């Protein structure tokens, strides 16, 4: 009995050398937001995920057949597209930087302004956004998919009913399959996670210093929690912050952050002007450029800006360098994925290039050669 | 001895039930065109293929960061993009239908007009085509890749030299890696291949009838060989045909095939007016729409058109149906592929959206919102 106690004490001591694991920062799949009508369990789950992956990669979900979910949320990279704002159909540029799809199932609200809750709600948005995927309405998207034998069969298999039925494919089923696939997009085991689990060697000295600075300086006030995007919230309740909180004339002049009113455009509440969902910092080193307008290409500069306009602090070069080292430790492991095979049209895509879209025919004309 | 002869006779009889294997139509990887300085063997081959796959999927090879090789030659589908003509940077539409990348390593010349020989030559074209990937020149593409640590390391590993060297990445190395990846894109074991190898049940009765009609009617005069794209030719020697050979006023009015002068634009030889490389028919059921201008969405209609303008024949509905059944039997097996991971920029892509391109600033302005 005495010996066991001694062993326990020695073990305790050796664990004590590492920082005690902080449960706040543990990425746990059980924290994912999953609706009761689209569970990530049960028979047919893998088929649903596979179908969702096909849809995610299928550019035929856009009016011109050129833009897929993956075009802007590239899962082969950091889950976004490395550009300031994304290009949708007909070369049109969107207004905001694409958020990463990796770990997005953990968000309690979706989009920069939180205008959707579940991934199922989010997935439907870009399809009919005129400058993103440009479908006139959801029935146009569904009609497109209905022309593809392989999809009708897969939807019937996953969601029941007959492949020949009129409602074999619906936009809700499309969204459910895509959301199910997106819930598999989780990056675990980052150096920080290993460090937090007790592996003291997982972080460099500089990254550890950065983690301390990150906490002491106050970054952690907003960027807390398992995704460094605020505390865990119930689905539909966003964790928003004003940005910039303390506008700086030079920074504003350079980056124009305040032009976009953010959540105000959704709620029309005065208090929501320039407020945004606090974004995750996981994999942040892979998701440049930064901020809602993608105006800052460099992570060090993003940290400097945050210190200035959110905390009112001029971070030193050495503080910035350490914080960046810490942020680099938040890059997780990306699971290997098989490429989907996209099912073919029965008879080819009849005159796809000639599909008339209602939006801005002037662009349509001007962009064509 | 006698018994053995009898057995042989019986075996011969049973094989005789199947059509004797016609060697003309055997897809053999040894027929691939591989240059001596980019062999598909030796140490480092897998690394070279993996690097090529990354590059093939990387939209950063285009000026706007939105168009990858895979955008127009989608290997998750039939190796093309299901649209009449492809969309390049800034929503610009190209002039010709994207040929499939599957089995393209067997072509003795590349592009519809044969203006490149090896895949290595082909791969460089779209990068600097102003309406495709829109890079000002190859050095702009190389400079982009040089900014990505992961690429510098991979190129050094595959092609030798130091990752920090100025010539760690060159456009020739880029093309070699992409071509090596493309040489893995082979679809074998189609129902027709199994039939030709002796499996009489691999084709339906209708498909067999179609194969006979295809030969008797004269389709096979051009669409012969292992890829139904003409006889095997030495690299650089294309097998071209005039199309339409016997123009039909109605068909011309509907589809406008003759507007594009094809190979003439390359050679300026009068005899090359409206001539084209004979395209492969492998996986043809997956690569609608058809012809150099993608004007025909339906495979049956494509067969009718071919009968009329190439053979001067009005094929009956039943003949067309059988030929289409045969063409469907040319869909091969697509090897499973792992998605690449695209290496990240060091510091994000500095102001990618603002990169100025020399071509058609009017489009640049008009297409942006």
Image (cartoon, coloured by chain):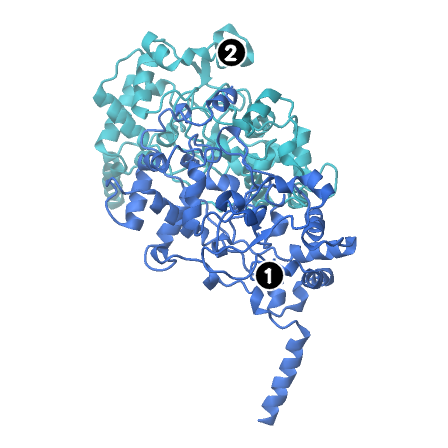
Chain colours: A cyan, B blue
At mark 1, the secondary structure is loop
Gap in Å between the C-alphas at discs 2 and 1?
A: 65 Å
What chain is tagged by disc 2? Answer: A
Chain for mark 1?
A: B
Where residue B82 sits: x, y (%)?
60, 41
Image quarter (top left, top right, bottom left or bottom right) of the C terminus of chain A? top right
The answer to which of B240 and A103 lies nearer the viewer is B240
Residue under circle 1?
A: B224
Q: Vertically, is A141 above or below B318?
A: above
Above or below for B149 versus B287: above
Quadrant location, the N terminus of chain A:
top left
> Which numbered dot is residue A264?
2
Q: Is residue B361 above or below residue B17?
A: above
Estimate the x, y position of residue A291 in percent, counting from the top left: 40, 21
Q: Quadrant of residue B358?
A: top left
From the viewer's perspective, is residue B20 above or below residue B163? Answer: below
On residue B281, the disc is none
Percent position of residue A65, x then y: 59, 35
Mark 1, residues whose alpha carbon is within 10 Å: few (<14), some, or many (≥20)? some
| Marks 2 and 1 share the same chain | no
């Amino acid at each position: 009995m005495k010996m066991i106690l001694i062993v326990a004490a020695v073990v305790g001591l050796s664990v004590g050398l590492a920082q005690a694991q902080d449960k706040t920062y543990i990425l746990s799949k059980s924290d994912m937001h999953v609706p009761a009508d689209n569970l990530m369990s049960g028979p047919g789950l893998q088929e649903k995920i596979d179908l969702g992956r096909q849809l995610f990669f299928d550019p035929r979900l856009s009016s011109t057949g050129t833009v897929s979910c993956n075009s802007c949320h590239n899962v082969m990279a950091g889950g976004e597209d490395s550009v300031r704002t994304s290009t949708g159909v007909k070369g049109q540029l969107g207004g905001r930087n694409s958020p990463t799809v990796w770990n997005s199932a953990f968000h309690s609200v979706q989009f920069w302004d939180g205008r959707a809750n579940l991934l199922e709600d989010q997935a439907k948005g870009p399809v009919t956004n005129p400058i993103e995927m440009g479908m006139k309405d959801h029935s146009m998207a569904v009609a497109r998919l209905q022309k593809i034998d392989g999809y009708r069969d897969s939807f019937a298999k996953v969601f029941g009913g007959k492949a020949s039925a009129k409602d074999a494919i619906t936009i809700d089923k499309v969204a459910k399959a895509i959301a199910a696939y997106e819930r598999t997009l989780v990056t675990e085991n980052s150096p920080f996670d290993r460090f937090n689990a007790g592996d003291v060697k997982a972080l460099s000295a500089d990254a550890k210093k950065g983690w301390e600075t990150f906490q002491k300086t106050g970054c952690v006030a907003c960027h807390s929690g398992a995704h460094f995007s605020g505390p865990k919230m119930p689905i539909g309740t966003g964790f928003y912050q004003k940005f910039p909180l303390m506008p700086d004339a030079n920074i504003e002049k350079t980056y124009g952050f305040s032009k976009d009113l953010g959540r105000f455009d959704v709620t029309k509440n005065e208090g929501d002007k320039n407020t945004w969902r606090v974004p995750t910092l996981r994999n942040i080193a892979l998701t440049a450029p930064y901020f809602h307008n993608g105006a800052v290409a460099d992570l060090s500069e993003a940290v400097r800006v945050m210190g200035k306009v959110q905390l009112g602090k001029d971070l030193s070069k050495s503080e910035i360098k350490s914080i960046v080292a810490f942020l680099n430790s938040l890059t997780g492991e990306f699971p290997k994925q098989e490429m989907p095979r996209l099912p073919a049209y029965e008879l080819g895509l009849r005159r796809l290039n000639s599909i008339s879209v209602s939006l801005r025919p002037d662009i349509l004309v001007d962009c064509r050669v």
